[in-house]
Image (cartoon, rainbow, N blue to C red):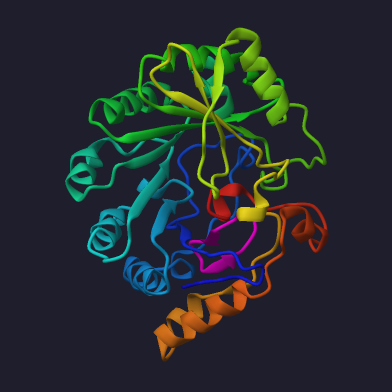
Amino acid sequence: MLIDNHNRKINYLRLAVTDRCNLRCNYCMPSEGINFAEKDSLFTIEELCKLSEIMVGQGVDKIRITGGEPFVRKDLMVLLRKLSTLEGLNDISITTNATLIGPYIPELKTLGIKNINVSLDAIDKNTFERITRRNQYDTVYNNLIRLIAEGFNVRINFIALENQNTQDIIPILEVMKHYPVSVRFLEEMPFNGGSKSFNSITWDYKKILDHIQSEYPEITKLESPKTSTSINYKIKGHKGTFGIIPSFTRTFCGSCNRLRISATGDVITCLYGKPRMNLREVMRGDNVESEIKGHILKSIGSRSKTGFEEQEKYDGIFENSMTSIGG
């Protein structure tokens, strides 16, 4: 079992399989993209399988596969097949932009991988294409509806971007009220590949909630797990729910049970800090299992208690793209 220096149990791993993405969302990276990692700097699929097995052996019972866009990797299903066999791994989840997932839906269902987060920052096609800088709306929407129809547990992640998509907050709830999905609204975060920096946001979780309540006054707050990052609600008459994630305000840090490992091997204990160490060469050395375990224990043994505390240690602005640090 993994316990950090604040006595928090770490049982949730966000594992990035690539830093590449086929969209160019303007809050994530510049239009020209970023300097993506060379292939030999990325974990191989065999290394990802081994790393996952080691982490589950240390008490991780939930793994979320992230990117970049995970399905950019042609060999992703090899990893997912391996994960589905690991005893003790109770939750395999995927975060995707839903552009490439279509051909894999039948096998995902067969493997029992049902938890899919779809990044969708607009329900209006023009707004979507302006944010993503790509013409993929129809593909994303069709795959989203297909996932819902096939019985997957779907969450929609919608980042509230000032002067870009906040006019779509009510419309997306109106469209999705007919489906058993959770629409989760996230505060914007200062990770965009260095295209800008900011120290505050206008659309924080309180403003998002006030905006929704102005349209839907009959809202019930739901009970959420202690480790949940989202504050969850039910609107009367809606099949699904919605949540708000204070990703910039960081009200959930005290119960953080997460660890991130990037596609290049960086161990990230907090999004607002720098990587603690890199596991890539460790994975390619001797005594792999014991060395990985030791490095993981060391990294969680000096975690900051909150994202604000971690940010104080960060020298300079956040120049990373979200696609390079696991979404």
Q: Is 264 a magenta residue? A: yes
Q: Nearer the viewer, residue 15 or 216?
A: 216
Spot occupied by residue 308 in the image (x, y as percentages of width and height): 78, 53
> What residue do we see at 47% from left, 60% from top?
13
| Vertical order, 306 against 144 (above or below) | below
Magenta stretch in the rendered image:
256-271
Left or right, 244 with reference to 162: left
Q: Nearer the viewer, residue 247 or 255?
A: 255
Left or right, 90 with reference to 292: left
> What residue do we see at 49% from left, 75% from top?
280
> What residue do we see at 67% from left, 54% from top?
254
Q: Nearer the viewer, residue 310 or 274?
A: 310
| Vertical order, 274 against 284 (above or below) | above
| Vertical order, 58 against 139 (above or below) | below
User: To which quarter of the image does residue 182 belong?
Assistant: top left
| Vertical order, 292 against 165 (above or below) | below
Spot occupied by residue 45 in the image (x, y as percentages of width and height): 33, 65
User: To which quarter of the image does residue 230 belong?
Assistant: top right
Q: Is 275 a magenta residue? A: no
Say whether residue 255 is visible: yes
Spot occupied by residue 234 in the image (x, y as percentages of width and height): 49, 22
Left or right, 212 with reference to 222: right
Q: Nearer the viewer, residue 229 or 310?
A: 229
